[in-house]
Every structure is written in C-alpha cells, then in structure tokens.
Image (spheres, rainbow, N blue to C red):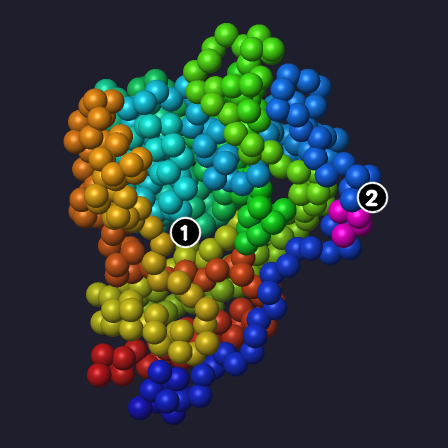
C-alpha cells in the first residue's frame, strides 16, 4: 500500500484542524441592531390598511436597498424564504388543482409551498451538469393543468432562464425563480432571480448573507408585488379597506420581517459582492487543483453566467475510478473533509410516495381538483436519481470561511484518496 496510508485504513488523517466557521456578522451589524433597540421600534407593521401596513423604516430601507442591488422595481421582505415561496405561488393566481413543474433536486419547501395552495407539484428532471431544471424535461411534463414553472437556481448558479422563459411564453405559464442559494449570481447580464415573473433569495443563517431567518422576494410586476405584500400581512383583513376587488388567494399570514432583521440585512447586503468574489477565487483554486483527477467532475458554469458557490458540487464517475462514490465519500470523510453525498429526489419523500398531505385521505391528489394520476415513482427523474444515488458529493462553501491554504489542504486530501483508489475496493 502507498506510504500515504488512508485514514479509513488506520492511517493518520490529513485534516486535523477546525476550519474557521463562516460568519458575516461584525461591528456594523452590532451597531445597526443597537440603534434599532434603542429606538424602541422593533416592528411597525399593522395588519390593516394603514401607512404602516408596509412596515417600519428599516424594513422599507432594506427593501429599497435590495431593489437597487438586484435592479428590480419591487423587493418584498419576508420572515423566511419558505414564506417567500408561499407568497410567490399565491401571488401568480394559482388555482386549486393547477400543476406547477419543479425540480426534485432541492429543499422540500419548494414543493410544500405549491401544496399550500392546493396545487399539484410535478417533478421534471435536471441537467446532469448544472443540477438545475432541464428544459426538455419541463416540456415533457406540461399538461393542460400546468400553470407555472418553479426554476430552482441550485448551489449558486442560475437555471437556463432563456430556454425556460421561452417555454413559459409558448405555453402561457408563469415562472418563479427560487434563487435562495444564488444571490448575486449573473445570468447573461442579469441577476439570478430577476428574470422570472417573481423570484427571490434566502436570508437563512447558512446562506451567503443572512438575517438569522428571512427572505427577499423580487419582481418587476407591480400587481404581483402588491399581492405579495397582502399575503405577507393578513390580506383577508386588509383588502376591504384597501379596495381590492381581486380576492384570489387573499389568505394572509404574518410573514413580516422585523426591524432588527432588516437593519442587519442592510449591512449584510453591502458585503455580498466581496463574499462572492472571494468564494469564486477559492472555487477556481479548487477546480484547478482537482481538474486532473480521473473520474472527478468539477462544477460547470453556463456561458456568460457566474456561479456564487453556495455548494461546490462534484461528481464521481465510477466507470473511470472503478470505485463507487460511497467508498470514495467514506475515505474523504475519514481524512477529515466535511462533505455531503445526497441532496435531492423530493419525489421520493413519504408525502409524495403515499400522496398524503392534508389530513389522511390523500388530499389534494384524491380530490376532484386533481385531474390526473400524477406519477411520483422512482424512475421519473433518472438524472436526479443517478446523481443522488451514485455520483454526487458536495463541499459546503457556506459552512466554513476557507482560506487559500485551506483549499490547498482540501486538494491534497482528494489527491491522497485518488492515489489510493486501488485499495478502496479491497
């Protein structure tokens, strides 16, 4: 065996240090929070038609800053991106039984936000290299009931929005961009999340920038924007006084972001460009260090686009390595590398396999609003399933504040495992 004995076989592990945790909070956020607390105004929303229906001064300042940064007409803050997805689906006038096409390679909130409005999630497959929705698979899944497409910009790169918007126009569909992991990513000169009818970003604590919990919805459609604001803040109690005549989906919630979180968000947004630039440099360094390892595929970025690396995704080709992904994953983990090996396949969750969501009788699938038997069986998304089961591993770039020397250590770890691939099958 190689003198550089793998830790999984009893050798000394290569990574013994604890990497610096990624933390964007500093003096600016502390001072901003202090001012809000001293003002005594921690929230100023009123759930009625009133000047404060739209929130307090920091909420409005943060939303204006987001409008300027993302170059959109409207930014609407919410208390989580899950709330943002619920608002977004409701604001495009979805009807019970309508079908919304989305990727299985994402977090469960994307699908549950669709079910929230008694609409039906339909899963299309993903591109094997970008991990985003495959436009050809979207086309194959369109039916008479299809109302919208939810394009998830996974890992830090936009979906192929030119193709998706062409499909939407052809079939008269609305498009939602879930760019939770991709704030600041560029798609052909525009910000990810801003090309669709409505899009947005997560401000959860492990994203590029954050307010603890929170989200920002963006749209250039003023009608959609006002519906977002109504759903965010007790719509059913406001529409009468406001004089709204379209009552579709005017079921409101308390999805409001507070003044403290908004003050933090204002300062965080100022840091986003620097965070992205640093992360892109580190990703480039990592890709250059791994590019010659046989059977390892580093991230691919679409032409005229950028990647902001929420996750650094890798694929293992067993046909070349002659070692299954799981064994390589275990060897890397034993060396001290923090990685993941599964991500998507929402269609295989118990909720979809059993078609049980509201109550125990199978609603909405068992009701008359569902016009067909939607298939969630294993095999409907072969690319997603193959990646999840056999090929994918991911390095979480939002967990640690890696330095250049840390990336060098990650590269050495991969090389050590590859130097010993022949022993992993014994």
Q: Earlier in the sequence, mark 2 or mark 1?
A: 2
Tell me the residue that label 2 is attached to. 38
Image x and y of residue 382, in percent: 21, 48
SS state under label 1? loop
- Residue under the point 34% across and 74% down: 330
Is 33 included in the stretch rendered in magenta? yes
SS state under label 2? helix
Span highlighted in magenta in the image? 30-34
Q: In this view, does 333 lie to the left or right of 400?
A: left
- Indicate the quadrant containing the N terminus: top left, top right, bottom left or bottom right: bottom left
Tell me the residue that label 1 is attached to. 300
Question: Which picture quadrant has residue 120?
Answer: top left
- Residue under the point 25% across and 69% down: 324
Image x and y of residue 127, in percent: 32, 44
Pick the residue in front: 325 or 111: 111
From this viewpoint, is residue 136 visible? no
Image x and y of residue 371, in percent: 20, 23
- Indicate the quadrant containing the C terminus: top left, top right, bottom left or bottom right: bottom left
Q: In this view, does 130 lie to the left or right of 85?
A: left
Nearest to viewer (mark 2 / mark 1)? 2
């Amino acid at each position: 065996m190689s003198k550089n004995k793998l830790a999984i076989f009893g050798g000394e592990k290569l990574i013994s240090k604890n990497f610096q945790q990624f933390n964007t909070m500093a003096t600016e956020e502390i001072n901003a929070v202090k001012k809000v607390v001293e003002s005594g105004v921690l929230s100023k929303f009123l759930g009625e038609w009133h000047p404060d229906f739209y929130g307090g001064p920091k909420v409005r300042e943060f939303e204006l800053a987001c409008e300027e940064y993302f170059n959109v007409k409207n930014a609407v803050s919410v208390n989580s991106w899950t709330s943002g997805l619920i608002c977004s689906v409701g604001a495009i006038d979805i009807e019970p039984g309508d079908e919304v096409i989305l990727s299985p390679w994402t977090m469960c909130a994307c699908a549950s936000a669709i079910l929230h409005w008694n609409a039906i999630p339909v899963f299309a497959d993903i591109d094997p290299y970008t991990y985003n929705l495959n436009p050809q698979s979207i086309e194959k899944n369109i039916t008479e009931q299809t109302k919208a497409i939810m394009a998830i910009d996974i890992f830090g790169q936009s979906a192929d929005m030119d193709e998706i918007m062409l499909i939407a126009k052809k079939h008269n569909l609305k498009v939602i961009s879930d760019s939770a992991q991709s704030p600041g990513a560029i798609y052909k000169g525009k910000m990810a999340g801003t090309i669709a009818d409505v899009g947005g970003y997560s401000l959860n604590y492990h994203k590029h920038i954050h307010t603890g919990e929170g989200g920002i919805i963006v749209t250039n459609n003023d009608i959609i924007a006002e519906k977002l604001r109504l759903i965010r803040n007790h719509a059913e109690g406001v529409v009468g006084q406001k004089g709204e005549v379209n009552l579709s989906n005017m079921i409101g919630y308390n999805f409001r972001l507070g003044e403290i979180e908004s003050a933090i968000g204002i300062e965080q947004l100022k840091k986003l460009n620097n965070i992205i630039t640093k992360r892109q440099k580190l990703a480039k360094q990592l890709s250059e260090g791994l590019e010659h390892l046989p059977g390892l595929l580093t991230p691919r970025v679409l032409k005229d686009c950028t990647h902001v690396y929420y996750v650094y995704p890798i694929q293992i080709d067993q046909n070349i390595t002659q070692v299954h992904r799981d064994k390589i994953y275990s060897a890397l983990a034993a060396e001290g590398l923090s990685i993941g090996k599964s991500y998507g396949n929402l269609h295989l969750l118990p909720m979809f396999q059993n078609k049980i969501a509201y109550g125990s009788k199978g609603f909405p699938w068992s009701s008359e609003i569902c016009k067909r038997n939607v298939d969630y069986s294993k095999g409907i998304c072969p690319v997603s399933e193959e990646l999840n089961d056999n090929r994918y591993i991911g390095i979480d770039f939002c967990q640690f504040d890696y330095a250049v020397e840390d990336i060098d250590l990650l590269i050495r770890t991969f090389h050590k495992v590859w130097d010993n691939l022949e022993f992993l099958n014994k």
